[in-house]
Amino acid sequence: GARATARQALAAPRTVAPPFAYISQPPMPDQKFVDAPDTSENWSMVPPDTIRNRIAHSYAKAGRRILVDVGDAVWDYMVLRSQYGQLVRSPFMESQYTTTAKQGKVAVMLFRSENILTEKEKRVVQIGIRKAWQQYWIQTPYEKDHIKAVGIEQFSAACGLRMLLGWLYIDEGVDDTRLESIAHEIGMLVEPGLEDELLSKVSGGVFDDHRRPVPRNSGNFFLALAPLGRAALRLYVHRYFLERPLRDEENIQRVESALRQEELDLAAAGFLRDEATEEEGLLMESARDVNDTYAFAFECLLGHLALNKPYRLHQIISSFGWAMPLPREFLAPE
């Protein structure tokens, strides 16, 4: 059973490829890691900012889906770490549907506030929001019930918040001072027991914040530590795969997957319906004629733009998440 598997793992030679390959390390002295220079003493993220090895141009290298999932892991870790110091259950600890709805509301609050997010951070949120529900609806069918339950607006807004958290966590252009500031605005950096004390006051003493459970043996609450440890491990595994370049076959398969006719047909039909200019629509309809596919017409349009309007080509490709958006100076004035 599980014990036999564990014994085999411990007895195995240390040549297993990571993750989960044990590599001998020198003993660590007792110390407190220093996080980003301007973060507070209460801030703690794993790995600490000083040893995180952030990624330059993370959106271009990782893509939206991965940054959204990294941000979801960051959210889970911050929520679980905050919850560990409270007796009362955090409102962020409910079902996945409720969590997504709350993330959506937080995203709207942060975006509409004047002095919380920078312009660049707002653009990151917008990239995370843009047609997010459509991408998940097509690529991950099991999310359909989730999207129906919370609504496309809330689901897309939640993706915007997750992408912001993932970008702040992993991009080379920022540090944890911004992530800490946003976590503080969300309400995830409260002192241990503060929410218990507040609930006790609001309930007139019905909720007794002094009746805290006493952990057995080692002084730890294991049922609360396990999900926190899983969230920390999830962050490290994300970090590992983002650092590791794709092997040749993986890269080739991903490119071929992105260029499948089914994918291009869906992208082309949506583009023609929602974003194509009148001139582009006429070109695609002329190319498609009667028997040809939308994918063929879309490829014709991209070829035409590559010859004549490369900036418009880049703008279209970036709308599908394959490139960074055009800088504002290249956009036509509204």
Image (cartoon, helix red, strand yellow):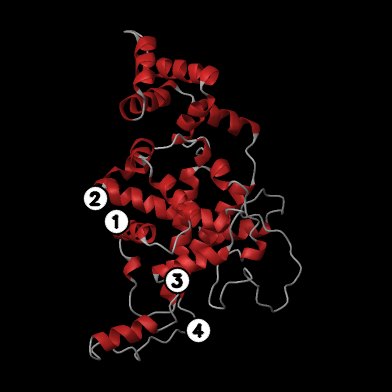
Q: Which residue is mark 3?
A: 184
Q: Which residue is mark 2?
A: 149
Q: Are marks 2 and 3 in contact (CB under 8 Å)?
A: no
The Cα–Cα distance between marks 2 and 4, rounded to whole angstroms, is 40 Å
Q: Earlier in the sequence, mark 1 or mark 4?
A: 1
Label placed on residue 223: none
Label placed on residue 219: 4
Is 39 left or right of 90, judged from the image as shown? right
Q: Are marks 4 and 3 in contact (CB under 8 Å)?
A: no
The Cα–Cα distance between marks 3 and 1, rounded to whole angstroms, is 23 Å
Secondary structure under badge 4?
A: loop
Residue drawn 44% across the image and 82% down it: 192
Q: Which residue is mark 1?
A: 97
Say what amino acid the circle numbered 2 marks: Ala
Give above or below for 322 relative to 205. Answer: above
Mark 3 or 1: in front is 3
